[in-house]
Image: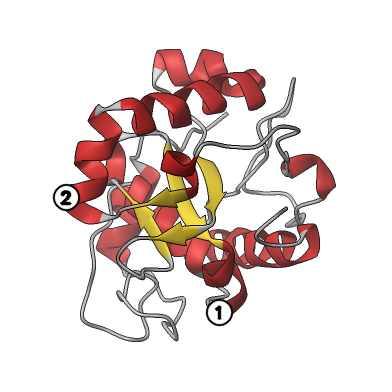
Amino acid sequence: GHFASEAEIMANLDNMITVFKDEANVRVISSAPFNYDTPFRDVKGSDHKWIHFRDSASADDILDVSCDAAAAKEDLLTTGAKFELLSSTMCFYGNWRRLTGYGAPIVIFIVRNFKDGKLGCSLGPLVDYVTASGDGIRRDPLITAHECGHACGLWHLDDNNNLIFPDAGRGSDIRHWQKVILRNSRHVTYF
């Protein structure tokens, strides 16, 4: 089964699209063939084409994952290799950007559970994927924006109005210096 519905995932993605556009003038687009966009157009939301469900069952090591240092260790072993393989095969059209490192897509995996009870996790700019639990998608409307912010190099701040505040219930603010880091991430391009 799926851990979050397509509608729940799309609502969370739409929140990310809105926050990144409103706060940092960064347009989030799906990884699809010939899909280029600029931040100057009207904001479009996600649709069902952004979401890929696996046809086969996944292994427990990518369904029940760790976060923080334990996740970094798992990433160096088979779990990370499995996530990277899925990123390359299920999100094929982003591979050329992933290889060049310019505008590399961030793949969001919805997992069953975090061993430490977290709702989402990112290893920061070290990898091209983030994870969120289905529970995280339902409980935290900004979980994908928060984790993708980490993937773009942002770190936690002790400001509950900020997108990178570590707990659910966070705001969507992005400070000026955070915008600079975000816009200079290898996940952000200007074409």
Q: Amino acid at mark 1?
A: Arg
Alpha carbon of mark 2 to alpha carbon of mark 1: how far? 24 Å
Q: Residue at x 36, y 31 (%)?
A: 80
Pointer 1 residue: 139
Of all residues, the one furthest to the left in this rendering is: 69
Q: Residue at x 64, y 65 (%)?
A: 12
Rendered residue at 78%/57% (across/down): 6
| Among the two numbered marks 2 and 1 on one chain, the one whose residue lies closer to the N terminus | 2
Does 60 sit above or below residue 164?
A: above
Which of the 4 image quarters holds residue 165?
Answer: bottom left
Determine the secondary structure under disc 2: helix
Q: Which mark is residue 69?
A: 2
Q: Residues within 10 Å of mark 2 (few under 14, many from 20)?
A: few
Q: Is residue 161 above or below residue 12?
A: below
The C terminus lies in which quarter of the figure? top right
Q: Is residue 51 visible?
A: yes
| Image position, residue 99 (x, y; %) | 43, 13
Q: Which one is nearer the viewer's eye here, 43 or 118?
A: 118
